[in-house]
Image (cartoon, coloured by chain):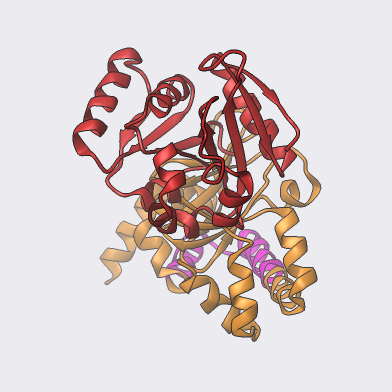
Amino acid sequence: MSPRKIVAVLGVSETHSVFMAKQIAKTNAVLLFDHNAAVLNSVFSEIQTAHPNANVEMMICPTNASWEADVIVLSNDAVIDGNGINKIKNVATGKLVLFFENAFSTDVESYSYERVQALFPFSKVVHVCESKANPSDSFDISGNNQEAVQTVLKLLTSIGLKASAKKN
Amino acid sequence: MFDQLFKSFQEKVTLTPAEMELCKTFFIPKKLRKKQVLLQEGDVCIYNAFVEKGILRSYFLDEKGNEHTVQFAIEGWWITDLSSFLTNSHSIYTIEALEDSELLLLTTEAREALMNQIPMFERYQRLLLQNAYIANQARINSTLTETAEEKYIKLGKAYPGIVQRVPQHMLASYLGFAAETLSRIRKQLREKE
């Protein structure tokens, strides 16, 4: 319904999240949050320098960022840290929650789709994994909600990334 | 986060604590900042929005580009384009936040599921629609029979919260006359006091 989706990127101290935040900020409003204020400031400045017209904002609270957002992007840290997730799960109901995984991650349990979906039982969880063939360049997208998977597919391809939907 | 919604339920129906908990899982919490748009003209309206905090309005533009305000919604009210929401058609309305607002959004699928799982929610929806129909009839009658001054006084008495919070030109547009007319009416009323 909103012309542009508002995307909250929670945890920007990782290369992946910074990359995503920068790309998404080209076309969508982005709310950035990180526990580390210095990192948050630095990423914010980086995005503003790269895209002077980007609609990007620093948030001091993950709950408020998620409450305002249509799409919530979780960093790897956030996926592993259950405490952080507790702060946002009530305001994530019905929303699209994305979590990323590196191509060669060995932490199978933390990044299991079932685990993250269980943490957000009333959200549409989508798993985005770097393609093993072309890490950092193309992504495999999967999830139980096909509409949510297609939305993420459109979002990623619209910002110039190579992405394809995979069966969960 | 659900205070106003549950208050609205309690005014019309009785839900068990378990039903209230279940209800929470169907609503999408959403914050809108002042001037942000919930529905853009031309899009399909996919949400029925309950206002927990703040104020919104729906309006459309005529061929000359004039704005016509159709509805305001303050705390405890619902706002949507019902026609677009129920028929999946493109909306002629825009719905925007006039203040920073906190909403609980319900999709058509969630609304159907809620009505199936909680029969009292269906009764609640029926009562809402009934009240909305009565309010619309009253508005038509008012449009056909009342003077501009009468309309303004009536609105102020019925909904002081709206009159105090909404810019004058939007109030005038809602009442169906020019902002200058409203300004003149307010001046006359002040002089009478």
Nearer the observer, B157 or A112 = A112
Please provide percent x and percent y for residue B111. 72, 61
Comparing B136 with B184, the one in front is B136
Q: Classify B37 as above or below A24.
A: below
- Residue stretch in magenta: B131-156
The number of numbered badges drawn on the structure is 0
A129 is higher (above) or lower (below) than B138? above
- The N terminus of chain B is located in which quarter? bottom left
Shown in orange, the chain is B
How far across and down, in percent of the image, does residue A115 sit?
A: 58, 51
The residue lying furthest to the left in this view is: A38
Q: Work out whether residue B87 or residue B105 is closer to the camera in this orientation and state it.
A: B105
Q: Is residue B50 in view from this perspective?
A: yes
| A78 or A60: nearer the viewer | A78
- Residue at x-position 36% and y-position 38%: A11
Judged by its main secondary structure, the magenta piece is helix
Q: Is residue B9 magenta?
A: no
Seen at 56% across and 54% down, the residue is A120
Colour chosen for chain A: red
Residue A86 location, x and y as percent? Answer: 43, 59
x, y percent for residue B22: 64, 71
Name the residue: 51% across, 28% down: A102
